[in-house]
Image: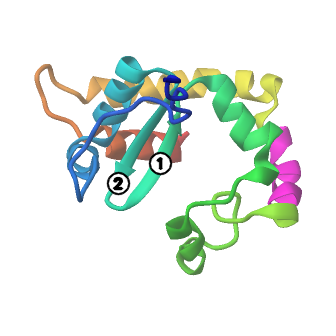
Amino acid sequence: MAAAPPSTKPPGPRGRWISGNLREFQADRLGFLTECARTYGDVVALRLGPRPFLVGSHPDLVEQVLVTDNRRYIKHFALRMSRTTLGDGLLTSEGEFWRRQRKLAQPAFHRDRVAGYAGEMVRLTEAMLAGWADGQARDAQEDMMRLTLEI
């Protein structure tokens, strides 16, 4: 009898029958995804409700999806539906329009330009951290969003 072919699906947390991994994801998104990467590796298969997802956490994979092979991927439907609220920026646009916008924005993210921002980034980060207290519970997503907007 021949052995079954190996699964091509990456490893990932098992999840519940109907909700999959939705409960854990909603409870602590960053913690859940971090633990998935630690436990299962650079590519993790999971399910949020009825939808299957593949999560890539290695920088090379992120570059492949966002830069090298970006034409092979589309934005999540919820993000595409947010255009009326968020507008037609890099976050929501796709295709040739996205490529034109990215080309216009790219000089601001050149290595030398980013290095020039480093001092201000450090100053703003230190100011944010100075307002934190030991043992204090923080909403990291809110804090990082505020810091990003300040920078």
Q: Is residue 18 above or below residue 119?
A: below
Closer-to-camera residue (118/93): 93
**Circle 2 residues within 10 Å: few <14, some 14–19, many ≥20:** some
Quadrant hosting residue 97: bottom right
Q: Residues within 10 Å of mark 1 (few under 14, many from 20)?
A: few
- Extreme residue in the left direction: 135
Indicate the position of residue 99 as horizontal and vertical percent values: 85, 55
Q: Which mark is residue 53?
A: 1
What amino acid does circle 1 point to? Phe
Question: Is 65 situated left or right of 34 in this image?
Answer: right
Residue 76 position, x and y percent, is 56, 61
Residue at image coords 51%, 42%: 54
Report the quarter where the C terminus lies: top right
Which residue has dot 2 on it?
48
Q: Quadrant of residue 63?
A: top right
Q: Residue furthest front?
A: 1
Query: What residue do we see at 71% from left, 53% from top?
Result: 73
Circles 1 and 2: CB atoms closer than 8 Å: yes
Indicate the position of residue 80 as horizontal and vertical percent values. 60, 70
Mark drawn on residue 81: none
Residue 90 in the image: above or below residue 140: below
Q: Please state the extent of the stretch shown in magenta in the rendering.
A: 98-107
Q: Is residue 84 above or below residue 117?
A: below
x and y percent of residue 1 in the render? 49, 23
**Which comes before the other along the chain, label 1 or label 2?**
2
Q: 74 or 9, which lies in front?
A: 9
Query: Helix or strand or loop: what does disc 1 sit on?
Result: strand
Along the line of sight, the residue nearer the viewer: 3 or 40: 3
**Dot 2 amino acid type:** Leu
